[in-house]
Amino acid sequence: MRQFEPFGDRVLVLPDATPAKTTGLAKPQSEQEKPTEGIVVAAGPRAAKNPKAKYEEYLDVNGERCLALGSGVAVGDRVQFPRYAGRDVMHMGVKHLLLRLEELDGKLVEVEG
């Protein structure tokens, strides 16, 4: 068995299976909705959540120094991404998405209440 380890800031996501939504006539397979949510299966070293999160310095669009809390994703996190982001890859016979961390819209967190 081979394990997939993404490089850098890449994230391997198992997209949710979305049933075809029909309201009468069925859409052709090419027009069916692509999933926009999934589960993180593997994360590269720069995408993985740092358990010792600390403030990291970066330059913003205007070239000014900023500080941001180091964050990322962990295996098992549910994430949301744009419909046509990333690229399809086959891993262990199952279609996955390979995305960059910056392509993710964010994590989906369950809240009580």
Image (tube, rainbow, N blue to C red):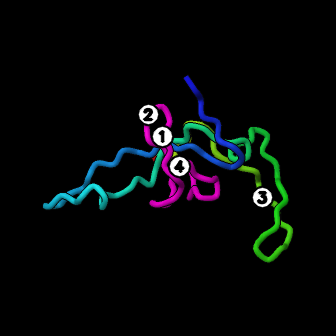
Numbered disc 2: secondary structure: loop
Q: Which mark is residue 79?
A: 4
Q: Amino acid at mark 2?
A: Gly
Residue at the disc numbered 1 = 90
- Tag 1 near tag 2, CB within 8 Å: yes
Q: Which residues are magenta?
A: 80-108
Q: Amino acid at mark 1?
A: Met
Identify which residue is drawn at 34% across, 58% down.
33
Q: Which image quarter: residue 5?
A: top right
Q: Is residue 76 magenta?
A: no
Q: Which mark is residue 68?
A: 3
Residue 68 located left or right of residue 78: right
Provide residue 30's location: percent of width, then percent of height. Answer: 31, 58
Q: Which mark is residue 93?
A: 2
Compared to 4, does 10 lie above or below?
Answer: below
Identify which residue is drawn at 56% across, 48% down.
98
Identify which residue is drawn at 76% across, 74% down.
61
Give the alpha-carbon distance from disc 3 to disc 4, as whole Å: 20 Å
Numbered disc 1: secondary structure: strand
Q: Nearer the viewer, residue 31 or 62?
A: 31
